[in-house]
Image: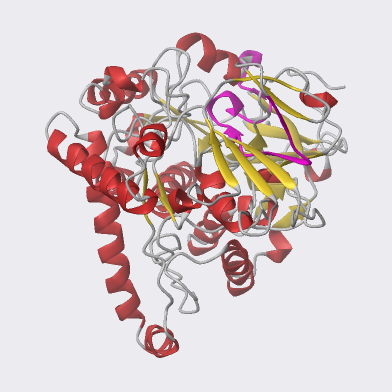
Amino acid sequence: MTGPGTHATAGRGSGGVAGPDHEVLVIGAGFSGIGTAIGLLRAGIDDFLVLDEQDDVGGSWHANRYPGIAVDISAFSYSFAFEPFAGWSRAFPPGEELKAYADHCVRAYGLRPHLRLGARVVRAVYDETRHLWQVFSADGTCRTARFVICATGWLTKPRTPDIEGLDRFAGDLVHTARWDPSLELAGRRVAVIGTGASAIQLVPEIAPSVERLHVHQRTPTWVFPKPDVPVPEPVRRMFGAAPWTQRTVRLLTDTVTELSFVIAMIHYRRFPFLVRAGEAFARLYLRSQVGGDRELMDKLAPAYRLGCKRPSFGKGYYRTFTRDNVRLMTEPIECVTETGIRTADGEEHGCDVLVLATGFHVLDNLPPFPLYGPGGRDLKEFWRTERFQTYEGTAVKGYPNLWFIVGPYSFTGGSWFGMIDYQVTHALRVIGETRRRGATQAVVRPEKHDRSFRRALRRQRNTVFVHPSCRGTNSYYFDERGDAPAVRPASTYEAAWRARHFDLDDYRYDRAASGAAT
């Protein structure tokens, strides 16, 4: 296999010809990759390719198909601002509608010719002589590009819990992220491990049909009522005929999201009462759902500050635990046996189906494949040894012509699509400036990168993430050092403003030696 320092190429980059196969390679065909591709076309750049390991577009919304899957932020915010969709059936539509929206965007902008599906990227290597990225796929193909935009998202690599005996279970074992649609649950004994976002959707969906359901909880989640109202047909027609009405609704949902998460969590020290108010509301909701059952309330109520880990919206989740056939298990799991789960108290709980609702590798999956910069420097190793860090949440010092849509300090916690927009804006401004200067390489200046990182760390001191109760919450926001690089300590509006106005001279622009990059 070709190593980090080699220059194997394919297509236009082969046979000694130095030019890249494509000007831009986008890695990932979920909404981050789709948004990037649309941004490139709108900027007049059509020499690009989008690679994805799956057999269709949509990312998590194509791969995740468990019962009850739905968006947990209003679809009016969870969509591209430039491509409003009037057909949502509900305020929080099911997963198949999000997949259909991804397909719609691909059709509307003619992206199919730019897609290469079933192309799993296994390595990327920077050729510092020719200022090109070499991107290797699992089938051995190497594609070269001047610029690479990594749009692989977060929810791509399922996390399997490290529980003794898991491989010995003789029944049906399934992870929510790799759901088997042929799996029959009705009338069977089911155990679910995990109480995060996927479990909060799955549990109330399957509880009525199963014989018995045990939900094993390690850390409870703050859950709020989900205002999942249907969108009446007359309203959908109005959205289609007058898109400004839907944009007005989006402005409202964006504002609510910013106030409830970004302002409350990011500016916790200034506005601690907002977090306390949110906690009080969530507890009131919990009480209303479980009928004042004090023991159950104590088990389901988090002991940490709201915001230490991702909160969620629930639709009947709490009430499910009042059913006769459902039991909340808080005793730690000792091991999995052939026939069920043994808890630390020595009791064994038999089950026919074991569901892992244990989420994804997030920070420990960045980047999701080996990525070698100049001198063969491994980005994963750099982040592990020198802390997760970026310039404005997207670029990394020492790694030219490379941007992340979702990387350390990229997501503000507001609209995911707002993040896509400002990250794409940043990358396109630099690509445009590189072209304008006749350069072949753009790399963020180390001092500008470090200043941006210091600002993120300084602001983090004002967030809820430094609260002592956050320790031990098993939150994917945090890394091993106690930093919270999964969240950018800024509002979405500030991040968008900075993407449009950062000084382009924060990058250094170079041109490859004569003849090396033409």
The answer to whether residue 374 is seen in the rendering is yes
- Residue at the image point whose x is 38% and y is 25% from the top: 484
Q: Determine if the magenta segment contains residue 365.
A: yes
Q: Which residues are magenta?
A: 348-376
Left/right placement of residue 151 relative to residue 298 reads: right
Q: Nearer the viewer, residue 89 or 436?
A: 89
- Residue at the image point whose x is 31% and y is 21% from the top: 469
Q: Quadrant of the N terminus?
A: top right
Quarter where residue 174 is shown: top right
The answer to whether residue 68 is seen in the rendering is no
Q: Position of residue 393 (x, y in %)?
A: 40, 34
Q: Position of residue 291 (x, y in %)?
A: 35, 51
Q: Is residue 307 above or below residue 496?
A: above
Q: Position of residue 333 (x, y in %)?
A: 62, 22
- Residue at the image point whose x is 59% and y is 41% from the top: 155
Q: Position of residue 388 (x, y in %)?
A: 46, 20
Q: Nearer the viewer, residue 458 or 377?
A: 458
Q: Nearer the viewer, residue 473 or 220?
A: 220
Q: Determine if the magenta segment contains residue 122.
A: no
Left/right placement of residue 315 relative to residue 170 reads: left
Quarter where residue 390 is shown: top left
Q: Is residue 6 above or below residue 185?
A: above
Q: Quadrant of the C terminus?
A: top right
Q: Nearer the viewer, residue 431 or 223?
A: 223
Image mark count: 0
